[in-house]
């Protein structure tokens, strides 16, 4: 009987049956494919070690690495319960802090002055804090709403801000929020707000839901008519069931405090710290009220030179830098209050916010951007490049990133190019393709000059010749087992050093609602594999070295730096389909197997150990039998399995610790053995 060499096709195929997969792998776990001249070989995936020794404390959703101008190397970690930065193996919790206050309206103005004094007994401010007044407040002939920096803390209950325009009247301890009046069986709502300044066609934001006359007002409303200087009308989405009047937020002002904890200067005293930042002789005191750390379902992270920019999903934009001295990230005061995510656009260095907000009301299709070179300036004028654009298709923007030549904006149904074209328009928008939307905020990446992403039922790439679908031989593994309720947790994982891009996703079969599986595309060999592994966030090779991944229990691992799973066996394996003789007309008898593997890395000890199991059956629907496992090591010459069957496949799995392997030309002796 002649010897025959097992030659496997590149990639894993879960679409075909085991009989069709005669020379193909149909199940895999933690393997990869490697080109070797004209051959394509199967090998064990690279292992990992902890990048940081302890858990961050909650599920990690995003990572970002950068190096500052002082050569400091940092890893930002966006988790559900925290935002942290790891530098030289030390973690600093920089989670932004907020406080929401509902208080009686107590504002004071002076005619001709832009200074406004606010009394709020619920919070003790510092000059480093900023606020967002959610409920419009009319006082002294002006209306206050939106973001303001605190200019001066007067006492434990009062502070001052600067209004955009000067007051026209002097008011002491006054002001009022809007009130709404409905009429039965009418959608028209009359808004009473002194000196409102509205005109027909502008929008009026109701950021605190208010129920009046059987309807609930919430969101942005067009001004339909202006009754007088103190009253105007809007239309509700339904008819009121009664005539009634109610004040927004029960008549109280709603203020969100964005807390910036003060840096503490050593040797505090006269001449230490910024002049005027603290009491004479005391240096800079910590912020009197510390607020509450925010939580987030997800994060977008980027850097602006030395500065980290962070945006929790559907939240504000924050900044932090290692040389600032501030212990927590601070809100970018004038940036939109609510955003789906952010990225830095090049080459103009503009901060882009998608699924952003206007007047504090989030629009899932709105894009806003800052001035060029200044992420703090979002004022749209002839003197800046700040601006905005609303995507006209789809129901929401799912994600965005800077590509090789332009920005990419994905909705749930299509993809758009965001090209810098200089003022006055600043950006031009062009739809690249339809029916190729993004499935999650972190399911797209750039590798070299190609953009890869995962859609709702297909994978795509853009490499300059238009959007192209990627044929996927493991489609069933992901899309037939995808937990769509938790699809936003899907995270792409590029590994350019090996020509791979993977997507980690939550499976229905796992039943946890958490990421537990992956599919991986080798774009050099145009083949796929798949398996089970949890990685909830990922960055490719960076200033920190090899790729880094994270988990839902808060641990961070560096990949491709070991042969094991942080000191534990990896459990890698693959199974082939069934090979046959004469289309299965005759049975096959196999009695001799000669293993051929590389049992260690180049110039390393050949210490890998593997198990080879032969599986066989006579018909596709019959029960499967097996022989083995047969352990093979570098000194194993052959094994004698002795099996007789119509269809024969094999399972190869690594065992033990410290080993790495690559399959060569495993041979067996087989011959026809009758038709039974």
Image (spheres, rainbow, N blue to C red):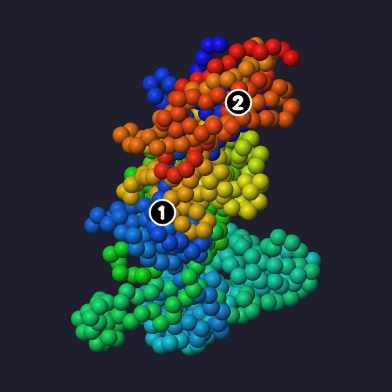
Looking at the picture, tell me which residue is in the foreground, 258 or 103: 258
The residue pinned by badge 1 equals 50
Q: Is residue 148 visible?
A: yes
- In the picture provided, is 151 more to the left or to the right than 534? left
Q: Is residue 349 above or below residue 666?
A: below
Q: Nearer the viewer, mark 1 or mark 2?
A: 2
Residue 382, quarter of the rendered image: bottom left
Question: Residue 281, image x and y in percent?
Answer: 24, 87
- In the picture provided, is 104 more to the left or to the right than 566? right
Mark 1 element type: strand
The residue positioned 46% from the left and 36% from the top of the image is 609
Mark 2 element type: strand
The residue positioned 47% from the left and 76% from the top of the image is 291
The residue pinned by badge 2 equals 649
The residue positioned 76% from the left and 64% from the top of the image is 239
Looking at the picture, tell me which residue is in the foreground, 489 or 247: 489
The residue positioned 55% from the left and 17% from the top of the image is 669
Question: Residue 636, image x and y in percent?
Answer: 45, 29
Q: Earlier in the sequence, mark 1 or mark 2?
A: 1
Q: Is residue 365 visible?
A: no
- In the picture provided, is 346 more to the left or to the right than 436? left
Q: Is residue 154 above or below residue 611?
A: below
- In the picture provided, is 323 more to the left or to the right than 650? left
Q: In which quadrant of the rendered image does the N terminus lie?
A: top right
Looking at the picture, tell me which residue is in the foreground, 363 or 328: 328
Residue 624, quarter of the rendered image: top right
């Amino acid at each position: 009987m002649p010897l025959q060499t097992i030659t496997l096709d590149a990639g894993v195929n879960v679409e075909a049956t085991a009989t069709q997969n005669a020379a193909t792998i149909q199940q895999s776990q933690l393997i990869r494919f490697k080109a070797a001249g004209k051959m394509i070989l199967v090998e064990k995936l690279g292992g990992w070690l902890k990048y940081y020794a302890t858990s961050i404390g909650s599920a990690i959703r995003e990572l970002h690495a950068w190096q500052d101008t002082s050569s400091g190397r940092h890893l930002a970690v966006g988790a559900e319960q925290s935002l942290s930065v790891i530098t030289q193996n030390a973690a600093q919790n920089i989670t932004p802090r907020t406080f929401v206050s509902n208080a009686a309206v107590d504002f004071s103005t002076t005619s001709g002055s832009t200074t406004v004094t606010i009394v709020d007994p619920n919070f003790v401010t510092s000059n480093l804090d900023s606020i967002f007044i959610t409920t419009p407040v009319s006082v002294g002939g002006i209306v206050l709403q939106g973001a303001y920096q605190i200019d001066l803390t007067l006492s434990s209950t009062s502070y001052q801000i600067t209004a955009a325009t000067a007051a026209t009247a002097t008011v002491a301890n006054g002001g009022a929020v809007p009130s709404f009046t409905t009429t039965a069986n009418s959608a028209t709502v009359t808004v009473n707000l002194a000196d409102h300044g509205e005109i027909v066609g502008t929008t009026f934001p109701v950021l605190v839901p208010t129920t009046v006359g059987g309807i609930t007002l919430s969101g942005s409303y067009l001004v339909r008519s202006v009754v007088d200087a103190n009253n105007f009308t809007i239309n509700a989405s339904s008819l009121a069931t009664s005539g009634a009047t109610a004040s927004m937020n029960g008549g109280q002002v709603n203020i969100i405090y964005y807390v910036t904890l003060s840096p503490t200067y050593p040797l505090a005293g006269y001449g230490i710290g910024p002049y005027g930042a603290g009491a004479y002789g005391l240096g800079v005191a910590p912020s009197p009220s510390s607020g509450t750390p925010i939580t987030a379902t997800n994060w977008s992270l980027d850097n602006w030179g030395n500065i980290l920019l962070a945006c929790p999903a559907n939240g504000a934009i924050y900044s932090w830098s290692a040389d600032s001295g501030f212990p927590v990230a601070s809100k970018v005061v004038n940036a939109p209050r609510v955003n789906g995510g952010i990225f830095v656009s090049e080459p103009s260095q503009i901060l882009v916010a998608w699924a952003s907000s206007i007047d504090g009301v989030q629009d899932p299709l709105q894009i806003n951007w800052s001035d060029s070179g200044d992420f703090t300036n979002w004022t749209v004028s002839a003197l800046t490049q700040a601006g905005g654009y609303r995507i006209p298709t789809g129901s929401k923007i799912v994600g965005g990133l800077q590509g090789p030549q332009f920005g990419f904006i994905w909705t749930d149904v299509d993809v758009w190019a965001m090209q810098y074209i200089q003022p006055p328009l600043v950006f031009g928008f062009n739809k690249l393709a339809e029916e190729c939307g993004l499935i999650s905020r972190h399911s797209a990446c750039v590798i070299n000059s190609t953009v890869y992403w995962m859609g709702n039922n297909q994978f795509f790439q853009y490499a300059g010749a238009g959007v192209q679908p990627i044929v996927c031989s493991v489609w069933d593994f992901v899309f037939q087992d995808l937990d769509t309720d938790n699809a936003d947790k899907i995270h792409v994982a590029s590994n350019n050093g090996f020509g791979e891009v993977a997507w980690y996703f939550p499976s229905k079969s796992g039943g946890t609602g958490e990421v537990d599986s992956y599919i991986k595309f080798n774009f050099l060999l145009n083949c796929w594999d798949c398996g089970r592994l949890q990685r909830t966030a990922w960055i490719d090779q960076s200033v920190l070295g090899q790729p880094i991944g994270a988990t839902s229990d808060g641990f961070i691992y560096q990949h491709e730096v070991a042969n094991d799973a942080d000191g534990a066996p990896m459990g890698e394996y693959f199974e082939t389909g069934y090979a046959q003789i004469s289309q299965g007309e005759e049975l096959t008898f196999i009695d001799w197997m000669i293993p051929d593997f590389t049992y260690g890395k180049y110039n390393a000890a050949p210490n890998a150990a593997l198990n080879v199991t032969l599986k066989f059956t006579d018909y596709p629907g019959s029960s499967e039998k097996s022989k083995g496992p047969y352990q093979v090591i570098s000194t194993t010459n052959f094994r004698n399995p002795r099996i007789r069957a119509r269809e024969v496949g094999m399972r190869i799995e690594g065992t033990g610790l410290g080993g790495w392997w690559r399959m060569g030309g495993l041979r067996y002796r087989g011959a026809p053995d009758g038709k039974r």
